Image (cartoon, grey):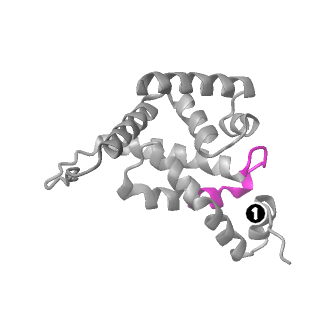
Amino acid sequence: MTTVADDGDLIARYQSGDEHAAAELVRRHTAPLARFLAIQGAPEDELEDLVQDAFFRAFRGLRGFRGGASFRTWLLAIGSNLLKDRRRRWKKQMLVELTPDVPDRSGDPAGEAEAGWTAERLGAEIARLPRLQREVFLLRAQQGQDYGAIAQGLGISEGSARVHFHHAVKRLKEAVR
């Protein structure tokens, strides 16, 4: 019977030279990080690079990881900061798409069309939320983090995390009505 090591154990093993521990951390957290960045509005063609860069920064900065928040919360904060930096850089570049791909949505059942439209509207509204509301909402709703972990990861109080989540949910509900 094998026991599953927690993230803290894996970090300690990696810092002692165990590359398999690093691989396990990457395996555990790649999909949640990618989902988090995608919902934050990361372009699909940049997602893999953003995830790799976030892990690179995390492993490079592990000595600074205090363990106050979970490794995942810390990693998501790194990914979010990386995405903000990239957005600033992307705004400075002018891209002209020569052959836009327009998906053919003909033949979809009305229910799927309505669900797709609502999902698009919800995704757009999530992107319009103020930064802290968006991050708290995604950490809570998508990642299942508790308010204490969210507060530690974002450097805010637990009460502030609750208020940001409440306001985000209220705004999103109004947007999809």
Horizontally, residue 172 falls left or right of residue 76, namely: left
Q: Residues within 10 Å of mark 1 (few under 14, many from 20)?
A: many
Residue extent of the magenta highlight:
56-70
25, above or below 71, in the image: below
Quadrant assignment, res 170: top right
29, above or below 91, in the image: below
Residue at left offset 38%, top offset 36%: 118
Q: Secondary structure at mark 1?
A: helix
Horizontally, residue 82 falls left or right of residue 93, namely: right
In percent of width and height, residue 64 lies at 72, 51
Horizontally, residue 111 falls left or right of residue 136, namely: left
Residue at left offset 73%, top offset 23%: 159
Give the labeled residue for mark 1.
Answer: 11
Residue type, label 1: Ile
Residue at left offset 68%, top offset 26%: 162
In percent of width and height, residue 83 lies at 47, 46
In percent of width and height, residue 119 lies at 40, 40
